[in-house]
Image (cartoon, helix red, strand yellow):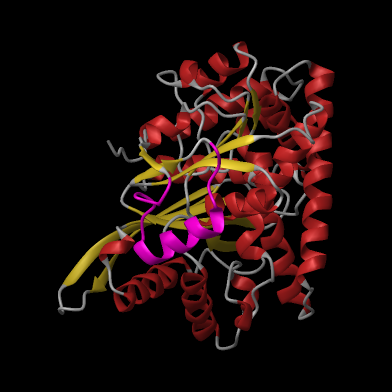
Amino acid sequence: MVVSYTHDVANAYQNALAQYDRAVRKMNLDENIAEYMRWPRREFTVNFPVRRDDGRIEMFTGYRVHHNTVLGPSKGGIRYSTAVTLDEVRALAMWMTWKCALVNLPYGGAKGGVIVEPKGMSQAELERLTRRYTSELIPLISPQMDIPAPDMGTGPQTMAWIMDTYSMTVGYSVPAIVTGKPINIGGSLGRNEATGRGVIICMIEALKRQGLANKPMKIAIQGFGNVGSNAALYAYELGFTVIAVSDVNGGIYNENGLDIPAVLQHYKTNRKLENFPGADNISNEELLVLPCDVLLPSAMENQITERNAGQVKAKMIVEGANGPTTTEADDILNERGVLIIPDILANAGGVIVSYFEWVQDIQSFFWDVEEVYRQLQRILVKAYDNTAAMAEKHKVDMRTAAQMTAIQRVADALNTRGFYP
């Protein structure tokens, strides 16, 4: 039986706030600063028309939320999905604030989204939708204010349309308005692979600390988009055994390991994972509870909940997605001794290389991919070390430690800047 991702978007923002409150209770923060950081700075909702290929005009709703700009311009992706809600965007923007602070980037958090099924639109319709949505965002975005990036349902081509629309509006080319662009218009080498590669870098750091770096490891990966597929390929190249992968329609499993390059070719040809030769078809729900050493939830929010956390057999969870584990599931997993490497650390590779892209665009000086990967590894390992030190000092789990580290950095900057006026 094939089961799509479960997705409880209604509580995504509640989950983000619960995580925040849990971290703040462990900290000695001024209550005014703590209250200020719970709130998004600004929220934008727009309803806009798009002309379909048959001439009909259809209305769409889009959002952009800036959670915090204390450390610098806000940064965050834009997703196209029928599951997009304002609460989901609020949650993702808040997580971006902590993610950027945790890895010491000069950014605050933002997120955007349009309620749309991108697979149900032609390329021309997607271009018209993107350009119109971008035109509505013009008052909110700039290289110094808010820099969008790809997310679920969007990619390099989407970013190219956003860049061109913004550039046509201001009258000159502005590559630094978005990151995740194609290489030939100012994108960075290594950006496409960055998030998935970063997930594996964090996994390896966790294994090293447990004395398991040279042990055979079986890995299951939920999600086969940009993050999951690149994580699977990098893990395979490093010699790990990837036993299962899945997309929104379901997944495949072979306890002895999958040939990931062949899986990628199968997926490219068939646009689905199921019926891969030599593997069993499984559901997403089944993948999450497979016997494995490491589980990488790299799909959507709220996949591991109080309903299935007790059945998870992995001893380590490395979160490739944003918010895949609820606070209730955290409690169950922590009680069972499962190590969770949280999203704001594990999947920060994307925003780190987005920062590199932004810097390269502003300077008009571009790096080779080896330099990108070297700097990515340096920043992620340092962030992991800082988080682990915080966890040890305060005797808390890694998620709480990561949030405490990030929240403290934003709070310190806010305290130094003060409240305006």
Q: Residue at x 48, y 28 (%)?
A: 290
Can residue 212 be spotted in the picture?
yes
Give the x, y percent position of residue 278.
43, 47
Examine the structure image and report whether residue 261 is included in the region drawn in magenta.
yes
Q: Which residues are magenta?
A: 256-278
Q: Quadrant of the N terminus?
A: top left
In the image, residue 332 sits, relative to residue 351, either above or below, namely: above
Q: Residue at x 77, y 15 (%)?
A: 395
Image side of residue 363 versus residue 284, left or right:
right
Image side of residue 276 versus residue 150, left or right:
left
Give the x, y percent position of residue 108.
66, 50
Can residue 145 be spotted in the picture?
no
Residue 4: image quadrant is top left
Examine the structure image and report whether residue 107 is included in the region drawn in magenta.
no
Give the x, y percent position of residue 261.
55, 59
Image side of residue 350 versus residue 46, left or right:
right
Give the x, y percent position of residue 367.
79, 73
Image side of residue 133 versus residue 410, left or right:
left
Quick one: 321 or 19, which is closer to the camera?
321
Q: Residue at x 48, y 56 (%)?
A: 263
Quick one: 104 or 141, which is closer to the camera?
104
Quick one: 306 or 107, which is closer to the camera?
306
